[in-house]
């Protein structure tokens, strides 16, 4: 079975598709200096990446959320709650972890399906 | 292909099923103030979630374990070793990460199949 | 559908195969005291594990990289860049996390397919 990729870089591809499964790279944002703003931008990026395969957020199976500072959990969660589809929320894991750049406050990795 | 979910909350679903794949949310526990007790409770929760789909722990493909303090690795491991099926252990990754609540000492995320 | 495993230990199996999906345990190395050396050794181990199923690194769908110290990001990345296949890079997430042993500087978990 063939593997399809988008936004292929020399380090990673932003989306990798195999059969009906879609694996996204961890999405980050530097368009805002607060967690809420970065979360909103990241969720937009996820919507955009999934839309290239004609897929909506109801098809997200699992999400892993890394927060640079776990005390921003509620701030991130408020944005998340407004974004996830009522009745179709994915499995989720949220932990604290320092991210690749000090300005990144949150990183979200999702696995979805067509 | 349809997606099935259980324990659907407004933030996450505890289990999401797609085809023969089962994705669980990161499981935590606050019923004990030591890692061994929390690990036991978490593994019970995983058994219970999987049992809703008629699935046993021999069908776990991979597990990611987050410890709030990596120095509790052996304590967690002792409970884990007694729980995993001999000859049918999953792929596993264990790292340190602060968790959503300071009382959470361990969080375990599993991917299983029917 | 049957589950196949290799290097089955009492805690984890190094590779777990279900259908055409391959889940590897987080790979670590203690053969070097720098990140570049450990990364090289880990990527060798991943090549070896995948080769048991006749699979090459072009079939890696996603990778999660945990660095004990995120300031070693570039060092790890230099080795990674030389290893990943041009035009066939996987989805990737990289975060900082303390690992099971203080000598482990990097741990890499991959999901691949046949």
Image: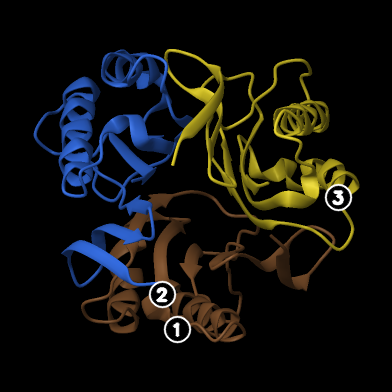
Chain colours: A brown, B blue, C yellow
In the picture, residue B113 is in which quadrant?
top left
A18 displayed left or right of C100: right
In this rendering, the answer to whether A62 lies above or below C36 is below
Q: Position of residue A74 (x, y in %)?
A: 27, 67
Nearer-the-camera pick, B13 or A72: B13
Query: In the structure shown, which secondary structural element does the residue marked by tag 1 occupy?
Result: loop
Whether residue B93 can be seen here? no
Q: Nearer the viewer, mark 2 or mark 3?
A: 2
Nearer-the-camera pick, C114 or C50: C114
- Dot 3 falls on which chain? C
Q: Which residue is mark 2?
A: A59
Distance (Cα) linking label 2 and label 3: 31 Å
Q: Which residue is mark 3?
A: C81
In this rendering, the answer to whether A74 lies above or below C21 is below
Labels in figure, total = 3
In this rendering, the answer to whether A36 lies above or below B42 is below
Q: Which residue is mark 1?
A: A56
Distance (Cα) linking label 1 and label 3: 32 Å
The answer to whether mark 1 and mark 2 are in CB contact below 8 A is: yes
Image point 42% across, 23% down: which residue? B89
Q: Position of residue A12 (x, y in %)?
A: 74, 60
């Amino acid at each position: 079975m063939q593997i399809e990729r988008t936004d292929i870089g020399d380090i990673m591809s932003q989306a990798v598709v195999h059969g009906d499964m879609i694996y996204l790279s961890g999405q980050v944002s530097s368009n805002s200096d607060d967690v809420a703003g970065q979360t909103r931008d990241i969720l937009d990026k996820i919507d955009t990446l999934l839309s290239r395969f004609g897929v909506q957020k109801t098809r997200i199976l699992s999400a892993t959320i890394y927060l640079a500072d776990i005390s921003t959990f509620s701030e991130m969660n408020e944005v998340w709650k407004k974004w996830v589809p009522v009745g179709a929320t994915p499995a989720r894991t949220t932990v604290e972890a320092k991210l690749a750049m000090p300005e990144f406050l949150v990183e979200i990795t999702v696995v979805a399906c067509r």
